[in-house]
Amino acid sequence: MKTSRLAGVIRLGQSRFVRQIMIVMTGTGLAQVITVLLAPIISRLYEPSAFGYFSLYSSIVSVLAVIASLRYEVAICLPKRDEEAGHLLVLAILTAAGISSAALLFLLFGGQKLVADYVPRHIVPWLWWIPLSLLAMGVFQSLTYWSTRKEAYVRLSAAQISRSVAVNTAQLSGGILQQGLIGLLGGQLLGQLMASGVLAYQTWKDQGSLFRQMWSWEKIKLAGHRYLCFPLYSAPQSLLNAISQNVPTFLLMNAYGSTVVGWYALAHRLLEMPLSLLGQSLTQVYYQRASAASQQKADVYGLLVKSTISLALTVLIPVLLVIMFGPELFMLALGEQWQEAGRYGQWLVIWLFIGFLGSPSFATAQVYGLQHFLLGYEIALFLSRTSILYWGVTHADARTSIAFYCVVGALFNGLLIVCVVVYGWRKLRLEEAAAKELGQREGG
């Protein structure tokens, strides 16, 4: 009877896990369907060079956004009590406000002129939008992890759909009105503000009374000190990761021009979307599950292995199709001027696929408290990818440079998976041995 009851509980947990993933996937999927359906239109309204400058600006924002809250938002899922998690949420939002204010002051007191020497003149006037983007993204990331902790996945789906509608509507309108780069940039900012606003409104409506109890400066400082490993290790690790992922935009722009960057950026964007549909959906639910399992001394390793294998089986065939027919698929969907983007996509999809498989491993490393390992890993990855890409842009053509960059990224992502899986297996064996020894002592 006990065995059948336990099996029923396990099946119930698994079905709930799948149901939660499907909720997140529905919202993310609808958001991406909108983007995919409008991509053939938008790609014909803007020149590849406009996408190149847009990608460069987006890279700057993306690099800064990962440390907007000093990664305190990632810690929100880990405390056992909601009160402490709430203090981390307040701390993360306040940190984002402080860093965005610092960025604004930097621009006001000569920063724009300083940066203008290192970026194309086309995006210099729009640097003033960066502080607002950082604030919006910092708030959104913080509320996303809070919603994940509370399993409020419908709320997250609504925010994702709102962002996609705002971005694509604005960019489509800008293209029709022939606004060029400002149409792409304005659409991105509008989407960030829309997503943050929707998520903030829904969160306040559902848990506003709880937030009123979280304004204890002493407890906020205590929570910040307890999870100090996130700004110390996770923040620089995330910053290095963001730089190494966006460094192709800067080096390719300098070596080959905005058109090559436009091909690369659109290929990366379109290939990442379907992979992130499932990867992001699973990771959001997985991180909450793994955190809870760790708190309850349950089997995190089994959850890691099952999730990784499931991801591999789900997208293997589409990935192989892109590897074999990338140029033809891009030319058919986007037009003849994007055929070269399909050739870049043949290499990009290999790196993105292995990185996609590593999503559960990265989340598990956070749960295991391996922030120091992730920082060391990221330093090695950053140095390797940047070095190989720099060699490529100084000695080879754009396609070869991108291929080397993608292969190195794929190898490192595969290494991360192996390391975390092995660590989890050893940790599980040690826990089982300790439990067995304790049982023998109690039995004796």
Image: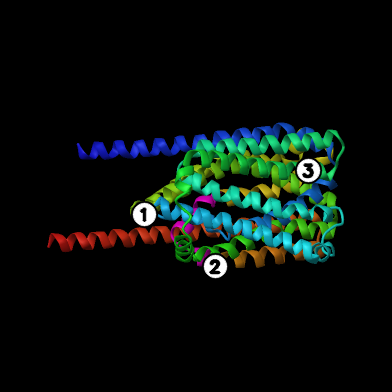
Q: Which residue does the numbered mark 2 point to in the structure image?
A: 232
Q: Is disc 2 surrounded by few (<14), some (14 to 19) or many (20+) residues within 10 Å?
A: some
Give the x, y percent position of residue 49. Answer: 85, 47
Residue labelled with disc 3:
184
Q: Up-down: is 14 above or below 299?
A: above
Q: Is residue 369 magenta?
A: yes
Q: In terms of depth relative to the viewer, which is nearer, 408 or 224?
A: 224
Disc 1 target residue: 295
| Number of marks drawn | 3
**The N terminus is located in which quarter?**
top left
For the residue marked with disc 1, what is the amino acid?
Gln
Identify whether 325 is placed above or below 434: above
Please provide the residue range marked out in magenta: 357-376
Could you say where residue 16 lies in the image, as x and y percent from the top left? 41, 36
Name the element at disc 3. helix
Q: CA distance from mark 2 to mark 3?
A: 35 Å
Q: Is residue 146 left or right of residue 430?
A: right
Whole-number angstrom distance, CA of label 2 to CA of label 1: 23 Å
Give the camera-side residue of 101 and 41.
101
Question: Magenta stretch mostly in which secondary structure?
Answer: helix
Q: Give the residue type at disc 3.
A: Leu
Q: Is residue 437 visible?
A: yes
Taking the magenta stretch, the answer to whether it contains residue 32 is no
